[in-house]
Amino acid sequence: MRHLMSPLDFSVAELDELLNLADDIEKNPPKYAHACDGKKLATCFYEPSTRTRLSFEAAMLNLGGSVLGFSSADSSSAAKGESVSDTIRVISCYADICAMRHPKEGAPLVAAEKSGIPVINAGDGGHQHPTQTLTDLLTIRSLTGSLGDMTIGLCGDLKFGRTVHSLIDALIRYPNIRFVLISPEELRIPSYIREDILRANQIPFEEVERLEDAMPELDILYMTRVQRERFFNEEDYVRLKDFYILTKDKMKLAKENMLVLHPLPRVNEISVEVDSDPRAAYFRQAQYGVYVRMALILTLLEITVSE
């Protein structure tokens, strides 16, 4: 039995296989419409979510399976003090696979150690968000044709942004990747990522504060919101929440084929006027999330669909 806690749980070859499967699912939906008949996905979300939870549910329904679960800790026995370990043991009696989001880093790993079914980390605190990373990789590969030879700008909350941390982890395994880390001083990338991942692997990167300075050299711009729920006080959040706003004028500085990605939800860090720009790929990115989660469910359940 296999779980997914981090993008690094899959080798590059396994990632390519997974993305190829997602690509085939996009092109041939009817072929997979009954692949999970009789199977159940449990969505255990201790933290609010729209895209991740609903895309997991859409993925399982598209495969012919069914879904059960809860959408907040308040609506589960966690409100009564039940541990994650006990919850997953019970869920293992009801479902075939589980997607878990939790505000505490490492909680899905604790669940996986006690689980009788595959567990997917659907986001744990400020740590990892591997299925968003799989979504990002599929989006980049589908829209550019490869996952190497590019300069990627990561902008906004790089300190608490688990999507950013997971994406860096995954992309450093591909050739000729360079990062531009765009953030205010207070929201810079954690030192362990700077030292233990980027510098230790000799990945070229630079840290800048102004988005405008970075725009002309980027092949991908990955925007993130400043996350109110990760701040210890409202004053710091209010001071930093509007630090970066991507506008049409700023888009004029970018390459003609640069892609703008965003894990969503956005607040106001991308102006709605940018939505009509053909380089704005964040809503297409959300659709790719369904395909990649379908591929992941099939892979972890070891279900093969014949031609």
Image (cartoon, rainbow, N blue to C red):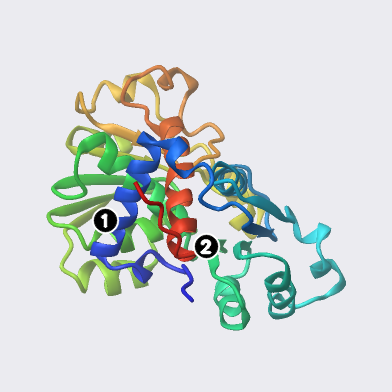
Label number found at residue 126: 2
**Compared with residue 152, is residue 245 higher up or lower down, i.e. above or below?**
above
**Between residues 266 and 291, which one lies in front from this camera angle?**
291
Quarter-of-image position of residue 171: bottom left
Label 1 Cα crowd, 10 Å radius (few <14 / some 14-19 / many 20+): some
- The residue lying furthest to the bottom in this view is 114
Label number found at residue 16: 1
Q: Tell me if I can see residue 24 in this picture.
A: yes
Q: CA distance from mark 2 to mark 1?
A: 26 Å
- Judged from the image, the secondary structure of the residue bearing numbered disc 2 is loop
Question: In the figure, is residue 26 to the left or right of 175?
Answer: right
At a point 52% along the width and 46% down the height, the residue shown is 226
How many badges with numbers are in the image? Answer: 2
**Between residues 237 and 141, which one lies in front from this camera angle?**
141
At a point 51% along the width and 40% down the height, the residue shown is 264
**Between residues 49 and 58, which one lies in front from this camera angle?**
58
Label number found at residue 262: none
- Could you say where residue 241 lies in the image, as x and y percent from the top left? 54, 41
Q: Nearer the viewer, mark 2 or mark 1?
A: 1
- Could you say where residue 23 lies in the image, as x and y percent from the top left? 33, 42
At a point 61% along the width and 78% down the height, the residue shown is 116
Residue type highlighted by circle 1: Asp
- The residue lying furthest to the right in this view is 80
Label 2 Cα crowd, 10 Å radius (few <14 / some 14-19 / many 20+): some
Q: Mark 2 or mark 1, which has the lower sequence index?
A: 1
- Judged from the image, the secondary structure of the residue bearing numbered disc 1 is helix
Question: In the figure, is residue 130 to the left or right of 93?
Answer: left
- Could you say where residue 209 lies in the image, as x and y percent from the top left? 33, 45
- Are the residues at dot 2 and dot 1 in contact (C-beta closer than 8 Å)? no
**Compared with residue 293, is residue 242 higher up or lower down, i.e. above or below?**
above
Residue type highlighted by circle 2: Gly
